Amino acid sequence: MSDNRFSRRYFFYGSLLAGAVPAGGFGSAPSLQAAGFKSVLEKLNIAGIGIGGRGADDLATAATSENIVALCDVNDDYAAHTFNLYPKAKRYKDFRKMIETEGKDIDAVMIATPDHGHTPTALFAMQHGKHVYCEKPLARTVWEVRLLRDAAAKYKVATQMGNQGFSHEGTRTASEIVWSGDIGGVKEVHAWTGSIYIGGDGVQSAPPEEPVPATLDWDLWLATAATRPYNHNEFRFWRAYMDFGTGGSLGDWLVHILGPAHLALRLYEASPISVECVAVEGTSQWTWPTNSHLRFEFPARGAMPAVTVHAYQNMRGDVPYPEGMGENEQLLPRSNNLAERGRYAPPEPTQERSPAAQAARGGAAGARGGAPGAGGAAGAGRGPAAPVDRTRVPGNGALFIGDKGYMATTSRGEGVWLLPASRWAEYKLPPQILPRSVSHQMDWVRSCKGGQPGCSNFDIAVPYIEWLILGAVALRVPGKLMWDARAMRFTNNEAANAYLKPYIRKGWELKL
């Protein structure tokens, strides 16, 4: 959304699941300044940490109304473009030095380092009284996310995890559809990464040592991780490596894709009772699997029935197609840019191809992907005009299976519709009961100024990420793992419990 200005309604009622409005209204504390918040009429002074990639986008949104006063990145070359965008901002490589030096001039920080750097960075900032926006998946282990939640409460700062889909109108519309009862009780959800996945390449040897680039502080980049020689693959493709990423695309796109399921099915009300990796390919001692199928089992939540959530990482094929769908009708539209085709556009059918055209692309549909559940050839079934291949699921999205119908969402929740398309064409949306957001970053900015907590503040984000990253443990430990959230342990596998807390090297100890 291009207009990031606050309306009075948005300032006081702009978040989801954040609790009741205080009697005096948000921002009604006797002194916002004494409580650590700025007035809505003042600009925040924001510092960016990890600014070369996603961090640059987060800062750009905040910069439309706030001040960017300091920037930090361990790689001068990678961050050069962002440094140049904010020539007046102070520049640092070590976030600790930046916060200690510029502390009185910084109100809040936006963090977009690799996953393994989230906890030490966010914790240090909160300990110095800074509001924190931290990219998903917040942290890699259950112990870390609970530590960050407790730190936010102790230091009384405004927080937000960077899973932008929580603020998207499509996600909130999906919740309203489920809550209306129009698709009935949902007992299964299938979520998948299709055109995007992040896993290893099945390497079976340690990455070889290479010279450290002159522009990079490799030791600072490692942060809490064990000391090791530099290798450009570990640095560039860190999401694929177990010591830096979170289950491959589990901590990346599946965080986005499963957001609508978490909210609509109220999975925050009950932790899963089990998690299991039921299929996996491309395993390695160093990198996350190339393909996987995870299964989470949740108990009933109030009137909502028990539900099984399936998460597929580049392993598309087990997703059942709804009854009544035509042969050329896909689960997802050909384009995820739904704004170009209306607010909630239904899926578009793919064009038929002649047998000769199919052969030119490598075989007829159904012959390339193998049996349902098979990994298949890379790229099979993809493309805006690819023939329908029901052993391969296109795009990135999720399918909700209710006892009265089916609902699909795409990517971060930008799109939502009922299936088959014939039902969606005649469907009238239920009444709007959830507030809509200006933007995810501005949702956090509002909370930094004494407004309602962000829709993915750490109290809300941690229950979500906690159950999701249990899947990273299941990717490393075979078998069905029974989870006891209260005790923070698996009850049937001590080997799995060893992965609930990360390795932390000396000098980077983490505590409140």
Image: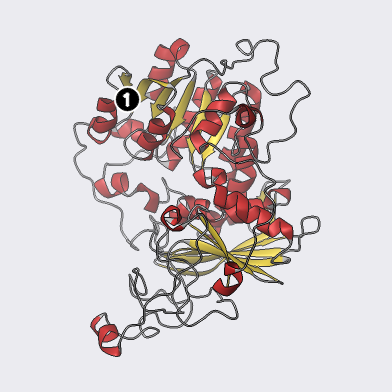
Q: Where is residue 40 in the image (x, y as percent from the top left)?
A: 56, 19
Question: Label 1 sits on what residue type?
Answer: Lys
Q: Where is residue 93 in the image (x, y as percent from the top left)?
A: 32, 25
| Label 1: few (<14), some (14–19) or many (≥20) C-alpha neighbours in 10 Å | some
Quadrant of the rendered structure where residue 307 is?
bottom right
Q: Residue at x 28, y 52 (%)?
A: 207
Q: Is residue 38 above or below residue 162?
A: above
- Asked if residue 499 can be seen in this view, the reply is no
Q: Residue at x 62, y 26 (%)?
A: 8
Q: Position of residue 39 (x, y in %)?
A: 57, 15
470 or 301, nearer to the observer:
301
247 or 262, nearer to the observer:
262
Residue under circle 1? 93
- Asked if residue 388 can be seen in this view, the reply is yes
Q: In this view, does 209 lie above or below 43?
A: below
Q: In this view, does 88 lie above or below 492?
A: above
Q: In this view, does 494 lie to the left or right of 109?
A: right
